[in-house]
């Protein structure tokens, strides 16, 4: 870690300690402070011209105080002594006028992270605007020159961001770490006698050296777009559906939403009271690995300072645990699972087949490469979304399809999961291969 980052973290820790002292002086029985300092560069080009160049350099602090079971929160970007005093005073004033909540308070002291492992999350990139523009242009040019049917572009972008976060509370916990995130993306339009289609591709990583090459991103964008030309609708039917890896993670995210504490204590989840019960076939293993090094999603502790740890969410198809912060845990009579702020690096264990192998196993059905709309009801599990992709016959892609709807219920979809591909998409916080569902209703013509 560079000396500048160490110095920056130490400075944020000093501010956090000052805030806790101010809260104590105001009579707060407990307090916590979350601070961040971030900087970055983003560029966008379209048709070779620079559209935007954005620099950002931000800092902020969130202060939460407790007067027994009354809570107040305030935020500020002013780190001066008077600014901090104002923020703490505002939080205390709010707390004094709020109703008591028996479940409010800091996370339990014995759940605090006692050690903060180095997860290798910080790889700064001293990229100049000129270099960023050159890379974005290279990416877009590779897409536009790929085929004469690429008729237009929505542009290419490059972004590089880094920052340091510190969290402290009156239990005596003080922790901080730095992260980086670099990405490049491209989106183009292809046209033939049947009309126009668009598609995109992107690459994201902690370390710029792990990004796909600019030209490769452009070529992949173009190839994906050309594949969609000649899209048509299919007749309404009930068939197997294969979710491509880059959209399959959304199905896992719906499960995570359904086992999130807030939805559970409000009794607004289709997985209510399913702990210890079968919700997937026996081969399914979904686990959280927050300490995997150098990947997006990993974190040594959650936003309440609670230590994160490796655990199974689903093992042998059986739901093993919920996703809880300390407040939801108290409401449910359970301990925090270290998930204040969300899950950390979730993986559904891959099977033996790649996407092509799963297509052959499916035989005839639908390969979904894009889902649209918000038609997912976490309360009932009802699932209905617009989709695009490819019709598959005899295990081979026959033609592209669009303007269709796929529908089922998430409980049924989970239990009807036939296989998980080994073509895992590692770009996000939820990592999944292609997912083959036995049967869904496809609504077209």
Image (cartoon, rainbow, N blue to C red):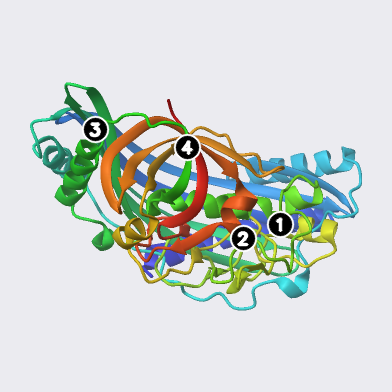
Q: Residue at x 76, y 44 (%)?
A: 268
Whichever of labels 1 and 2 marks the residue nearer the N terminus, that label is 1
For the residues labelled 1 and 2, the Cα–Cα distance comes to: 7 Å
Q: Residue at x 61, y 55 (%)?
A: 256
Residue at image mark 2: 167
Q: Position of residue 139 (x, y in %)?
A: 17, 43
Considering depth in this image, is 397 or 118 the residue closer to the camera? 397
Residue at image mark 4: 237
Whichever of labels 3 and 1 marks the residue nearer the N terminus, that label is 1
Considering depth in this image, is 75 or 239 the residue closer to the camera? 239
Residue at image mark 3: 155
Residue at image mark 1: 32
The secondary structure type at the circle numbered 4 is: strand
Numbered disc in front, either 1 or 4: 4
In terms of image quadrants, where is residue 404? top left
Q: Position of residue 106 (x, y in %)?
A: 77, 60
Q: Look at the image and tell me whether residue 309 can be seen.
A: no
């Amino acid at each position: 870690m560079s000396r500048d980052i160490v110095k920056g973290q130490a400075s944020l820790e000093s501010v956090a300690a000052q805030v806790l002292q101010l809260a104590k002086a105001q009579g707060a029985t407990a307090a916590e402070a979350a601070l961040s300092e971030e900087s970055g560069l983003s560029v966008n080009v379209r048709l070779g011209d620079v559209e935007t160049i954005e620099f950002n350099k931000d800092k902020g602090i969130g202060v939460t105080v407790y007067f027994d079971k009354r809570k107040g929160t305030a935020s500020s970007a002013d780190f001066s002594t008077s600014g901090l005093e104002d923020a703490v005073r505002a939080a205390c004033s709010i707390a004094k006028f709020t109703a008591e909540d028996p479940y409010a308070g800091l996370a339990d002291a014995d759940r605090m992270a006692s050690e903060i492992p180095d997860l290798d999350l910080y790889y700064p990139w001293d990229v100049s605007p000129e270099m960023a523009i050159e890379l974005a242009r290279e990416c877009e040019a590779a897409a536009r020159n790929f085929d004469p049917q690429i008729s237009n572009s929505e542009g290419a972008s490059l972004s590089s961001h880094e920052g340091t976060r510190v969290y402290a509370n009156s239990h005596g916990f003080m922790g901080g770490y730095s992260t980086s995130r670099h990405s490049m993306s491209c989106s183009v339009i292809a046209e033939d006698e049947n009309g126009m289609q668009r598609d995109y591709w992107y690459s994201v990583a902690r370390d710029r050296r792990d990004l796909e090459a600019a030209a490769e991103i452009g070529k992949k964008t173009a190839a994906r777009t050309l594949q969609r030309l000649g899209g048509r609708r299919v007749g309404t039917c009930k068939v197997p559906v294969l979710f491509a890896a880059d959209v399959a993670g959304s199905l896992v995210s719906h499960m995570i939403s359904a086992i999130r504490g807030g939805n559970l204590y409000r009794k607004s989840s289709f997985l209510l009271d399913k702990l210890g019960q079968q919700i997937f076939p026996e081969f399914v293993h979904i686990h959280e690995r927050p300490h995997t090094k150098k990947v997006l999603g990993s974190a040594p502790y959650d936003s309440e300072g609670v230590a994160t740890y490796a655990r199974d969410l689903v093992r042998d198809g059986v739901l093993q645990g919920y996703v809880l912060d300390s407040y939801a845990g108290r409401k449910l009579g359970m301990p925090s699972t270290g998930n204040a702020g969300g899950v950390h690096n979730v993986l559904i264990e891959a099977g033996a087949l790649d996407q092509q192998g799963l297509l052959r196993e499916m035989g005839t059905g639908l390969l979904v490469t894009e889902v649209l709309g918000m038609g997912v009801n976490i309360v009932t599990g009802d699932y209905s979304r617009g989709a695009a992709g490819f019709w598959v016959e005899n295990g081979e892609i026959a033609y592209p399809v669009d303007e269709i709807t796929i529908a089922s219920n998430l409980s049924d979809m989970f239990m009807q999961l036939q296989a998980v591909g080994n073509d895992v998409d590692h770009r996000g916080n939820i990592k999944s291969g292609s997912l083959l569902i036995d049967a869904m209703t496809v609504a077209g013509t």
